Structures are given as C-alpha cells and as structure tokens.
Image: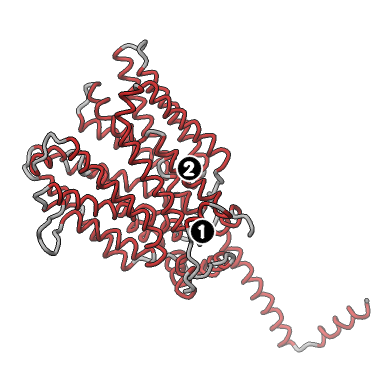
Amino acid sequence: MWGRHREAFSMYKRMPSRDHSTLVDDVEENSALLQNSMDVETTNPSWLLSFPHVVVATISSLLFGYHLGVVNEPLESISIDLGFRGNTLAEGLVVSTCLGGAFIGSLFSGWIADSAGRRRAFQLCALPMIIGAATRTLTSKFRFSATTRTLAGMLIGRFLVGTGMGIGPPVASLYLAEVSPASLRGTYGSFIQIATCLGLMGALFIGIPVREIAGWWRICFWVSTVPAGILAFAMIFCAESPHWLYKKGRSAEAEAEFERLLGGSHVKYAMLELSKLDRGDEADTVKLSELLRGRHFRVVYIGSTLFALQQLSGINAVFYFSSSVFKSAGVPSDVANALIGVANLTGSIVAMLLMDKLGRKLLLLWSFFGMTMSMVLQVAAANSYVSGSGSLYLSVGGMLMFVLTFALGAGPVPGLLLPEIFPNRIRAKAMAFCMSVHWVINFFVGLLFLRLLEQLGPQLLYSIFASVCMMAVIFVKKNVMETKGKSLQEIEIALLPPE
C-alpha cells in the first residue's frame, strides 16, 4: 500500500508547474462554489425585491375590507333614496347579497388561480368589483351600486362585488405564500389582515359625511373603483408565482421570476427545493373526492377546521352586536366603530411583528386562549349579580379585548398557514374549498346570531362561544405544525404521507 502512495506522490512531484497551478485553481474554485452554496442557504434574500409585489397583491385585501364595511353607515341613506326604508328584509339583502357572491367567487377561485395563473386571477377579481361598484350594463336598463336607481340594481351590483371578494382572499394567500422568502412569509402574510383592517376603517371614514350630504353613499361606492383599477393595472408588472409556473412545466420562466423576487444568488437553491416535489401532470385535475380522503385529507381537515373555528368563535357576532353594546354604555356609534377598528389594527400590527419570531402555532394558541378569557368577561357582564356600571365596563372591555386577541392570531394566521401546509398540486383547490367553508359558516352565524341571542340569552350564547375558543386551543395544540422559517417544500415533505 505504501508503494502505491509513494508512486502517486512521485507522480505529483513530476507534474509540470502549470498543472500544479491548475490543480490549485480547481480546488479553490470548488471551495468557492461550496462556500457560495452555504451562503445561499444561510443568508436571507433582500425584502426589497419581493415587497412591491406583495403590496400590490394586498390591495385585494384592502378592497375586501372596504366592501365589508361600505354599507354600514350609508345603509339608511341608501334605503331612503332607493325607496325601501323600513323594509328590514331589503336592508338585510343589501348587506348579505355580498356574502352570497363571495361564496360563489370562493368556489371558483381555485380553478381560476390554477387555470389563468395568480396574476390573472387578481385582475379577474378586480373586474367585477369595478363593474359592480360603479358601471351600468350594456343595455343601460340596470345600473349597479353607485349609479343605480332601484333596489334590484343595488343587489346585482353587490352580488358582483361579492364574487370579486370571494376570489381575492384565497388568491392573495396563495400568492403571498408562493412569492415570499421563507424568512418573511409570516410578516408578509400579516399584510392581508392589516390591509383588511385599513379597508374597513377607510369605509367608515369615507362614510362619515353620508348623513349631511345627500347622495354621498354613491361616492362611497365610486371610491372603491380606484384601488380596484390600480390592482388590475399594477398586476401587469408584478411577478407570476414561480410555483404555478413550475407546476405548468415552465421552469425557465419560474427561474426568471425567482430572480426578480429573491435575487440571482438564490435562484438555484430555490429551484433545487422546488424540484424535490412532483409537479404533477397538468392534465391530472384535482377532484373534490381527492381533498376529502386519502393522502391530502389531513391537511384539508386541518385547514377547513381552522376556518370553521375562526368563524364559530363569535368574531362576526361581536362585530354585529358591538354597536348596541357601546350604545348602551353611552358611546356614540362612530366612536365605537373607531375603537373596534383601532383594536383590530393594533392586534394585526403586533401579529406582523411577531409572526416570524414566535411562530404561527404559538400566536394561534395564545390568540384563542385570549378570546376565551374575553368571552368569560362577556358572560360575567351578562350575569344578573353584576351591577349596571360594572356590567357595562366588563362588556365593553371584553369586546375590545376579544377583537384585539383575535387580530393577534386567529384572524391572520389561518389565511397564512393554509397555503403553507397545502401541497403545491392541490394548493389552489384546497384553499377554495376551505374558504367556501368559511363563507358558509359566516353566513349562518350572521343569519342566526340575533335569533339565538333572543332564544338563549347572552350568558349562554357567550358561554358557547367561549367553549368553541377553548376547543380551538386544544385543536391547535394537537394538530397544527409550526411552519416558521421552513420552505414550502420542507413543509409539504413533513406533512404529506408517502403514497
């Protein structure tokens, strides 16, 4: 053996000096490549590259929040101008028709996002919002929302706006999860909740002059066409999702988009991570039965249950009932709306700062636990043994605490977590399914809340909400995986059982 080593050493000594230098150069080059690979894995991409694309995408969430709140203040003026004042059914339809449209939009959102791409889906989301909010039909027999003279035109316009609202949230969650660096995905995902809060507060602010200026409610609808137009136009210049491009077999385009979003030094590593997964056959469509059983059932079950618990926690009931609670405490409705809005926005900003530090699971646990304690305060406020002033303080304090703790986790995390845990092949369809569950439960909570309040009383009803929040804590503890700092491919490999 020593003879072979000595022979090799002798050959090395006899090598020309030029070959010596070539060998040294090769070693140095390989060392440099190895170091660069390690640097790519250990350093994070600059947030400046992906930030503009994320901001444009969250305009859809701004519109979502705006249209949720746009009819709250002007509803009385709308009913007078369109001739249905005092008709509670018509007033309820003006509010709830939007939810029906949102359910339809959410059902088709996965198909649209997978067929047309994420960018086109955003543009298709903006289109019915513009038409429904402002324009008239080609026959000019009906005018929608801002220009309508009839209740029918208003309802058609609200339904069209609702379809855009249904498409926007799942596509925004998909897009942000797929274009964000792993180190920033939680922070960027929180932008959705913040934009929704800003949209709600913007609708309340713009609706302030509605009682003093006749016809101002039409301006409220016209204003929404501006951000919708900006969204449709700005998406032309935004990056397409590299995950969608890779799924469609367009790897070269996916590399180019990764370079725009992450920087050139991170492209190879991002493509390497993406190539670990089977992109599937483009002709192999995802069927509903595939989501409800087999390999994908667990993640779809987790996602739909999180959205169900979010809605059954009573958050929308709190929003619906907050005005009367504040009114009984002597707080004007505009001040009450401002307090709710500030609590919601404050919680969302804190969640953004903590999402990539504490993680999704911890925020969810403490959020649902805080909501449980808030509902306990509401139950105590409804107790007949508590004095009148004490009851009001507990009720108002519990309500603000509930909104704040909701915004810390239960509000923003499900929309961020679901596209993280869904495999690339089913991500859009699974998001559409879970958002449909969200809208169905949202509709029934809004429909039945006041009736349940009359039948059961506030103490029992708030006790039920507190129980649901506590069930959510247990569910999250047992079923939710922490995704902080992990790539989408790492999450998919960890959650998806082998075939």
Q: Residue furthest left?
A: 214
Q: Which mark is residue 305?
A: 2
Q: Residue furthest front?
A: 289
Which residue type does callout 1 highlight?
A: Asn
Q: Residue visible at 48% across and 70% down?
A: 282
- Quarter of the image for residue 452 reads top left
How packed is label 2: few (under 14 Cα within 10 Å), some, or many (20 or more)?
some
Q: Residue visible at 43% across and 58% down?
A: 47
Q: In what quadrant of the picture does the C terminus appear?
A: bottom right
Horizontal placement of 94 versus 480: left or right? Answer: left
Horizontal placement of 332 versus 346: left or right? Answer: left
Residue corresponding to mark 1: 44
Alpha carbons under labels 2 and 1: distance apart: 33 Å
- Residue 18 percent location from the top left of the image: 71, 88
Which mark sits nearer the N-terminus, 2 or 1? 1
Q: Residue visible at 61% across and 63% down?
A: 38
